[in-house]
Image (tube, helix red, strand yellow):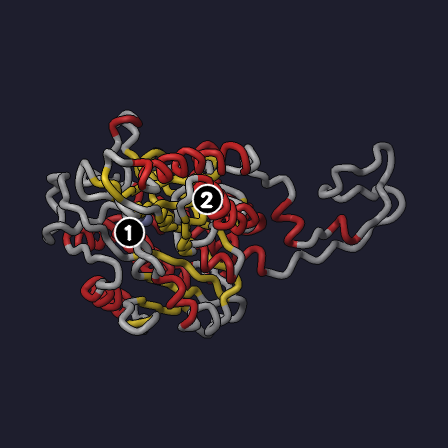
Amino acid sequence: MDVDTIRALADAQAGYASEAYRWLHRHPELSYQEVETARYVAEQLRSLDLEPRIGVGRPGEHGVVAVLGADRPGPAVALRADMDALPLEEATNLPWQSQRPGVMHACGHDAHTAILLATAAALRHVERDHPRSLVGPVVLLFQPAEEQEPGGALGMIEAGVLNSPPVAAVFGLHQSPLLDTGTVGLAVGARSAAADDFTLTIRGCGGHAAWPHRTVDPVVVAAHVVTALQAVVSRQAPPTNAAVVTVATIHGGTKDNIIPDEVVMTGTVRTLVPELRDAMPQRIESLAQGIAAGFGAEATLDYAWGYPVLVNDAAMTALSERAAIRALGESQVVEAEPVLGAEDFAYFLEQRPGCFATLGVGVPSIPLEERPTGHSARFSLDEAALPVGVAYYIAVLDEWARTQQPPPQPSPVATGEGAKPSPRRSGGTIGGPAPYDPAAAVPSMSAAWSAGLGLR
Ligand SMILES: [Zn+2]
Ligand SMILES: [Zn+2]
């Protein structure tokens, strides 16, 4: 499909996408509570003559799955949207603002869901009018509970959504108001961080604050530990590997003249490299224990593994880049910086190759510093970005179909006078035909997709 066709298919769904987005925005539900949202999504899918499964996930979870073109030959592709909202009192004054006190779609998951519904609607037209742009089934994953661990992705994977039909690649997107509407950001490799939490307990021996020499003061030990932990990133992690260790809470003591027995600290660790991630608990623990021991105190560490590093597959990111360029234009596709936030789409990418893109939803006329970001009570997004997301997904599927189609047969090899080097062989010898090389004449599809497609 050419760019005009893709954009026309997407733009035809702009009204529907906006309607779905506003309904979802008015009716936000917290993680693990997406009952009405799932019902709405299922109704919409049924109206497209799809047969959604609901309640997909661990017991009590509200995932929705539908398969478009279940009988279509070829490997399946999955597209994923998340559906949950956040505990925030909305302060946007939008006409469609949240009708639920204290709950708000402040991370754009309403937009992700609306985009995937509108994509499903557009794909019905693609099936009819452009059948060659689809190969294999398209699995639509509406995932609950992205915002709260353990996250809804694991339950859906355990429920087998990647196995029947067998999914070969998985794609998703997340909004960002820091990119203008009409743009897509792509990161090769690590795109968002692993997020692990810890609780550090410093145990000393309390007593009167005026007789500190009769105590082991865990407050002083905790202060040294917090300071020392800054060196885990600055002195122990390779400077090229971004990481974060944040102590976010410290609790200890009851009164200004009592030294407490213990201080409890909690924090988060973010890493973009799995090896560094694995090393973190031991580094934090040995540092805290060493410092505590020096003061005669004890430190114990509880470490909770959270979402893993989200790693975009190189070939699938190249495919996404080609799709985005075709749907939006070359200048509209930017290289995205990895972020130290976390996203449970990472679990899907541990199972299958794929790509998680960033969709620009910032109103271009609003200066960057005035755009509220996600998780803000003032967060809002540009609805004009919804059909852009649809166009991106249609183009991804179209690119996928191209990769799956049999490569063109080489034309019979001309010999002698008039023989020309294959145009694909840019390295052909000047002054005569290059020796025939079938591999060069018909490159493997994976080589064709990865060659020269590096992100800028
Ligand atoms: Zn979020
Ligand atoms: Zn989010």
Percent position of residue 423, x then y: 72, 41
Q: Is mark 1 within 8 Å of ligand 2?
A: yes
Q: Amino acid at mark 2?
A: Ala
As drawn, is 421 to the left or to the right of 109? right
Residue beneath disc 1: 109
Residue toward you, 405 or 303: 303
Q: Residue drawn at (25%, 41%), measured in percent from left and top? A: 259
Relative to 451, is 316 on the left or the right? left
Residue 384 position in % (x across, y down)? 28, 41
Image quarter where the C terminus lies is top right
The residue beneath circle 2 is 293
What amino acid is labelled 1 in the image?
His
Residue at position x 84%, y 49% in the image: 436
Contact? badges 2 and 1 (CB < 8 Å): no
Residue 77: percent from left, percent from top: 47, 62
Residue 185 position in % (x across, y down) = 43, 39
For the residue carrying disc 2, how many other residues have a C-alpha within 10 Å: few (<14), some (14-19), or many (20+)?
few
User: Helix or strand or loop: what does disc 2 sit on?
Assistant: helix
Q: Quadrant of residue 179?
A: top left
Vertical relation: 2 (above or below) 227: below
